[in-house]
Image (cartoon, rainbow, N blue to C red):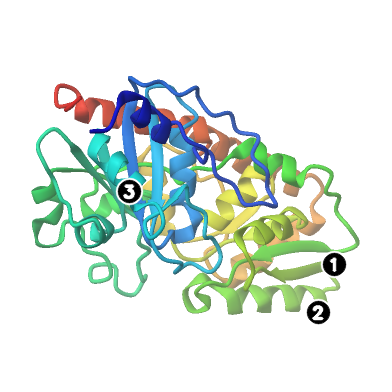
Amino acid sequence: MVSRAQIDAVWSAAGRMLSPSLVPSRSAVAPYDPSALKVLQLTAYDPGSSVYRYHSAANTVPGVVSAFARIGHSNPHCDLRQWDLEIDEVTIRVLLATADVVHSHMDYYVLTNNLREGARPGRTMARTYHGSVDPGNMAGSIQVNKDGIDDRMKAVVFGARPYHHRFGVPHWLPIPMPVDDYLALAKGHKRGAKFRIAHSPTMRRIKGTSEFLAAVDYLATHEGVPVEAVLIENMSHGEALQMKAECDAVFDSFWLGMQGSGLEGGAMKKPVLAGDPDAQADLVKLGIPVPWTIANDGNELRDQIRRLVLEKGFAEAEGRRVHEYVRTFHDYPVVGAKYAKILTEAVRGTSHR
């Protein structure tokens, strides 16, 4: 029998706010409230280093308290976790037994295979789809509610990106960003002799890496534009944030518009180059003006880079514009409040406590 004090001890334990060691967090954790909605986040891989940020964002607002458990070390760039299933299984089972919501990220594998549990009366299930889609195979590259699994789990279903609406995902829960943390990381950076543009070439074929490098090379070689490409790869999440903070702009992708890398740059108040007309239309349908500096192909990218480097005030204006969007929709307290509202409405009248 677990006592009330033991339950409170595990839910209020250290690690409610997680951050890479190179980026100490300035985000405020809401005081622990024993009556708050208790949410256990479960995953193995942390796609785009986003699950730890969802967990941290939830803990910045009243009304909800999040715990975060992972198993394995499949993401070499980000290994953050509050609890480890191979080390802390007893504690995690206390969290599981006392959670109001069990939130599985990507799939239900950790819950059903590692913990050998599933849905049960009095406990709400949730799932977030993180998956990116291949632009050449939109229909076949992501399957929502495959074989009716979300229906059987009676899950509250979230999507990390607006395009998930196209597949029937009801709730867009924006990828959270600790805006003040990242803004502080970039504070003091001054433009040098060359305008440095960061890019994370995680999937070169569809992110537009070749076109980006060609655009920068052409401008530098044939037009004498003082610009430099900075590839961010093969390093930890914290190191990547530090390198990005030392650049002047970010090129994200020609595919799906602005994703996690661009959101980080936007939080730092750096202009973000990105494209994809469909991704732009997804935002417009939500009533949100496209916040990034639009470049849908190599030619547009070259033209926009030239403007950012040479046109007085353009880079600063674009940085302010995208930053305002990130702060409005992706800041930790904003995402945390939206998350708490959706889950509270889902759980109302069904709590087992």
Quadrant where the C terminus is found in the figure: top left
151 vs 136, left or right, is left
Q: Is residue 259 visible?
A: no
Disc 3 and disc 1 in contact, CB within 8 angstroms: no
Kindly identify the residue that appears in the image at 59 percent across and 72 percent down.
298
> Three-letter amino acid code at disc 1?
Pro
Would you call the spot at circle 2 few (<14 residues within 10 Å), some (14-19), or many (20 or more)?
few
Q: Residue furthest front?
A: 1
> Three-letter amino acid code at disc 2?
His
Residue 233, compared with residue 353, is above or below; it is below
Viewer-nearest residue: 318 or 94:
94
Would you call the spot at circle 3 few (<14 residues within 10 Å), some (14-19), or many (20 or more)?
few
Kindly identify the residue that appears in the image at 48 percent across and 67 percent down.
75
Q: Residue at label 1?
A: 226
Viewer-nearest residue: 60 or 185:
60
Residue 218, compared with residue 259, is above or below; it is below
Residue 237 place in picture, x, y as percent: 60, 59
Q: Residue at label 2?
A: 222
* Among numbered discs 2 and 3, the one appearing first in the sequence: 3
Would you call the spot at circle 1 few (<14 residues within 10 Å), some (14-19), or many (20 or more)?
some
Q: CA distance from mark 3 to mark 1?
A: 57 Å
**Secondary-structure class at tag 2:** helix
116 vs 293, left or right, is left
**Secondary-structure class at tag 1:** loop
Residue 86 place in picture, x, y as percent: 38, 60
* Among numbered discs 3 and 1, the one appearing first in the sequence: 3
Residue 47, compared with residue 221, is above or below; it is above
Residue 350: name its quadrant: top left
Residue 328 place in picture, x, y as percent: 52, 32
